[in-house]
Each structure stands twice: as structure tokens, then as C-alpha cells.
Amino acid sequence: MADPERTSPCPGAALPRPGPGAYGGVMAPLPNVPADPHDDLDAYVGLEVARASERARTRGWATVRTLPPGSIITMEYQVGRLNFEVVDGAVRRCWKG
């Protein structure tokens, strides 16, 4: 009796057999992702946002994102991005990604 999950809609046509995939069953290699800059994130807390942004860029951060408290944001990690939670023009919290 034919396997119902492997029955072809066209009689006489063969369905491909499941195989290991494009990489032989192994996940694709990770790309060469650059490392985040080595920096003391606590040093940004309390700084005025313009000064903190300038400091971050001179230390190698590609993207600096300023956010008000309680912002709804995506949670994907982006290498080279520094996030500031800003209250009254000063950095209250700082995190990578």
C-alpha cells in the first residue's frame, strides 16, 4: 500500500525523497561578525545625551539609539548598536544591541 504522505498527485510521478538539505544536514556557517567595541557602558549613565552620543561614536559604536522610558522596541541584537534610555536629556540606562 502507498504511503499517504508520499502519494503523488500525478499517477506514476515520483516524489523527491527528503534529504539532508543544502548543507548536508548541518547549519550554515556563521558569518564573520565584527565584535562590539570594548567600552564601559556604565560610564554613559548620567551624561547629557549629545555628549554620550559623541563619546559612543568616537569609541566605535556604529549606531546610537536614544529612547524614552517605556519605548516599545524590537529585541533583535544588532552588533555595533548602543541604546540609551533618556530622561530629561540625560542617559538613565545604556545597553548593547
Image: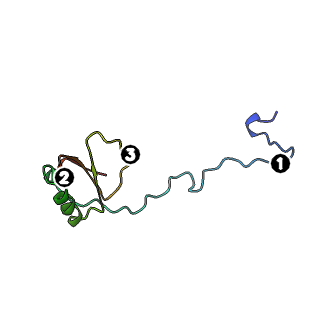
Q: From the top left corner, tell me how far across and down residue 82 is, in percent.
A: 27, 54
Q: Secondary structure at mark 3?
A: loop
Q: Nearer the viewer, residue 42 or 38?
A: 42
Spatial CA distance of label 2 from label 3 is 20 Å
Residue position for label 1: 13
Residue position for label 2: 41
Considering every residue shown, the one lying at the far front of the view is 88
Instruction: Identify which residue is drawn at 21% across, 47% down.
Output: 86
Q: Nearer the viewer, residue 96 or 29?
A: 96
The quarter in which the N terminus is drawn is top right
Looking at marks 2 and 1 on the same chain, the residue that comes earlier in the sequence is marked by: 1
56 horizontally vs 73: left or right? left
Q: From the top left corner, tell me how far across and down residue 54 is, in percent.
A: 20, 63
Mark 2 or mark 1, whichever is nearer to me:
2
Look at label 1 and name its amino acid: Ala
Instruction: Identify which residue is drawn at 21% across, 59% down.
Output: 53
Q: From the top left corner, tell me how far across and down residue 89 is, in percent.
A: 18, 50
Spatial CA distance of label 3 from label 1 is 46 Å
76 horizontally vs 19: left or right? left
Mark 2 or mark 3, whichever is nearer to me:
3
Instruction: Identify which residue is drawn at 76% across, 35% down.
Output: 3
Look at label 2 and name its amino acid: Leu
Residue position for label 3: 74
Q: Nearer the viewer, residue 79 or 88?
A: 88
Look at label 3 and name its amino acid: Thr
Q: From the top left corner, tell me how far across and down residue 42 is, in percent.
A: 15, 50
Q: Quadrant of residue 71?
A: top left
Q: Secondary structure at mark 1?
A: loop
